[in-house]
Amino acid sequence: MIPNAVKVVLAVQVFNNLNKKKMINFINEAKEIFEKVSSIRRHIHQNPELSFQEFETTNFICKILAENNIEFQRITETGVVALIGNSGKCIALRADIDALPIVEETGLEYASNCNGVMHACGHDMHTSMLLGAAILLKKNENLLNGKVKLIFQPGEEKLPGGAKLMIDAGVLNNPTVDAVFGQHIHPQDESGKIAIAAGPIMASTDELYLTIKGKGAHAAQPHLGNDIILTASQLINQFQTIITKFKNPLQPAVLSITSIHAGNTTNIFPEELKMMGTMRTFNAEVRSLIKEKLKIICENYAVLTSTEIILDIAEGYPTLINDTNAAEFVRTTAVELLSNENVIAFEPKMWAEDFAYFAQNVPSVFWFLGVKPDGIEQMPALHNPKLNPDENAMIHGTAMLVKVAIDYLDR
């Protein structure tokens, strides 16, 4: 049994900590380190690295963590996990660290030094905000009623997804993680606003790779060969009937062919054609239905056109589903931090995110941070070479990560 005197001391400590937490202005704390966070972001932006090649980015993250006396370890080749806090339950905050194969067109003084590689999806900001949150959480470590894991995850942009690899490597264990939180910039929302929704918010995604093989022939003698160009066009049209005629119209789904390569002259039917595309949905049964119908269509068209059609479906990320209770907690926390008018409902997108793997394992929430500067009606979207988010939004993003972590551990 715990002596009454000890119970009193513990109660006083808890009371004092709660009062200290109420007195903390997380926005002001984030403002105090904004120059540091901005400097970190610009360094990462200037030195982007592709998925699973983030070696220097990882070294830089480890350097910042070490400078702030934060315990960390490498997990997978380019992943990092840090730990802050005391005994008790554990939550995790996650940021992705990889860039995209895009030639930057922003004209910024800190634009990418790596030709053909750019942080065009905001991962530089995600990583910087998490490092900023790490600095503030370490500063207030004595107020934490548990532990906070900081997950710096590689390879979000490339299958099989760094989240899955880190989970397989045990990132959610030792200590066991009770909930995971992450945020993503959103260029369509005003700078500093938080957008959130419960339930499915991003689609599952699968990559489609098709090869059509036939007998080449002169274009003036189609009967002597196989017109695989015509076969491809018929396939594309037939694929769309899966979306319009075979699934419940109340279940959203997208099937898009995005690349076709074949032939190199005007008068010869090529012998091989390659196509690529993507399929996305929120429903597992619809996902299976689309795959089944794709295979059937390809098999039958191969017979009909006397061609060979090879279909390869690379299974991608699952549907990202925000935990209902945890999402309501984040929404309430955001309102407390930023006021009601700065917290809006997020409209689910047919995008995809490997954060979904975390959500499959533990209650998780993924929200969006507006980064559209004042006075701009429309700014470039994610994955655009001209994307230039408002850095000041990182103040709200950093503060959100800190407050979510501290408050959730007090529940």
Image: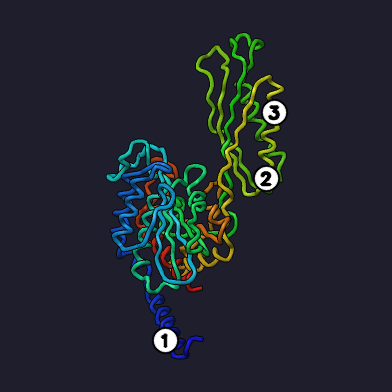
Q: Upstream in the sequence, badge 1 or badge 3?
A: 1
Query: Local crowd at mark 3 within 10 Å, few (<14), some, or many (≥20)?
Result: some
Q: Is residue 275 left or right of residue 42?
A: right
Residue 130 appearing in the image: yes
402 w.r.t. 290: above or below: below
Residue position for label 3: 299
Residue position for label 1: 9
The secondary structure type at the circle numbered 2 is: helix
Residue at 37 percent across and 39 percent down: it is: 117
Any mark on residue 286, and which? 2
**Residue 162, position as x, y percentages in the image:** 47, 48
The secondary structure type at the circle numbered 3 is: helix
Q: How many marks?
A: 3
**Residue 114, position as x, y percentages in the image:** 32, 39
CA–CA distance between discs 1 and 2?
A: 57 Å
The amino acid pointed to by label 1 is Val
Query: Local crowd at mark 2 within 10 Å, few (<14), some, or many (≥20)?
Result: many
133 w.r.t. 233: above or below: below
